[in-house]
Image: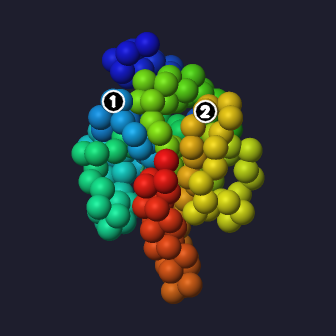
Amino acid sequence: MTIDDIKERIKNISESYKEEATGGYISGDGPIPCDILFVGEAPGKTEVSEGKPFVGMAGKTFEGFLNSIDLTRSKVRITNTCFFRPIKIKESKTGRESISNRTPKPSEIELFREVLDEEIFLVNPKIIVTLGNTPLKRLTNFKAIGECHGELYFNEELKKHIFPMYHPSSLTYNRSEDFKTIYEEDWQKLKAALKSI
Ligand code: URA
């Protein structure tokens, strides 16, 4: 499978999915092959309109921390676990529609199992950095990011190093100084892990 085949698969899966509302789709971004692969959850509105992962609010946070460990977007590959934007549509009493993001359902993540596996195969990274619980559960046996963040693991099945991190948007939800310190330390631990592999 080539990257163009992957893009075609994402298009076909997303356009034929009718079970729930979705708001467009994207594929991964960055060089192939590449030593470092970041895997997020699913694109949001800005990602779909710009056609790239992590370019919205969470993306700005992500890129700032990436730069803080002397990496740039051009040196890493970034992708997602679910390639379409999962949305909820709510109608107010006055009939106005509001659209928001939702977490992808397990069945939606399964739709893209083969696509993500193929991307990992093509990218052939030395390390996969999972961002938040969704890619963590998809690519490891851990149940929650709180129990494993900031440490380097080896996935025997994938034969890859895995480094679980909190999702950058968790900084928006958890505004405590303690959490910010933990998150910053995890990026420094990633920097050290990259040197060790
Ligand atoms: N959050 C994600 O998990 N992925 C994106 O691409 C953007 C925001």
| Position in image of residue 190 (x %, y %) | 48, 60
Viewer-side residue, 176 vs 44 = 176
Residues under numbered marks 1 and 2 in contact, where contact means CB atoms less than 8 Å apart:
no
Give the residue pinned by disc 1. Answer: 32
Q: Tell me which corner region of the image, top left, top right, bottom left or bottom right, holds residue 71.
A: bottom left
Work out which residue is located at the far bottom of the displayed protein and give it.
177
- The disc placed on residue 154 is none
The total of numbered circles placed on residues is 2
Ligand 1: does it lie within 8 Å of the C-beta at label 2? no
Residue located at (36% from left, 21% from top): 3
The span from disc 1 to disc 2 (Cα, nearest Å) is 18 Å
Mark 1 vs ligand 1: CB below 8 Å: no
Nearest to viewer (mark 1 / mark 2):
2
Within 10 Å of disc 2 (Cα), the crowding (few <14, some 14-19, many 20+) is few
Note whether 108 is above or below 143 in the view shown: above
Seen at 45% across and 46% down, the residue is 38
Residue type pointed to by label 2: Lys
* Residue 14 in sight from this viewpoint: no
The furthest residue to the front = 196
Relative to the observer, which residue lies in front, 14 or 88? Answer: 14
Question: Residue shown at 42%/49% (left/top)?
Answer: 44
Report the side of 113 relative to 74 (left or right): right
Dot 1: within a 10 Å radius of its alpha carbon, few (fewer than 14), some, or many (20 or more) residues?
some
Marks 1 and 2, the one that precedes in the sequence: 1
Task: Name the residue type under label 1.
Answer: Ile
Query: Image check: 69 left or right of 129?
Result: left
Which image quadrant: the N terminus?
top left
Measured as percent of width and height from the top left, residue 23 is found at 43, 39
Q: Percent from the top left, x then y, of residue 142?
A: 73, 50
Mark 1, secondary structure of its residue: loop
Callout 2 secondary element: loop
The residue singled out by tag 2 in the image is: 159
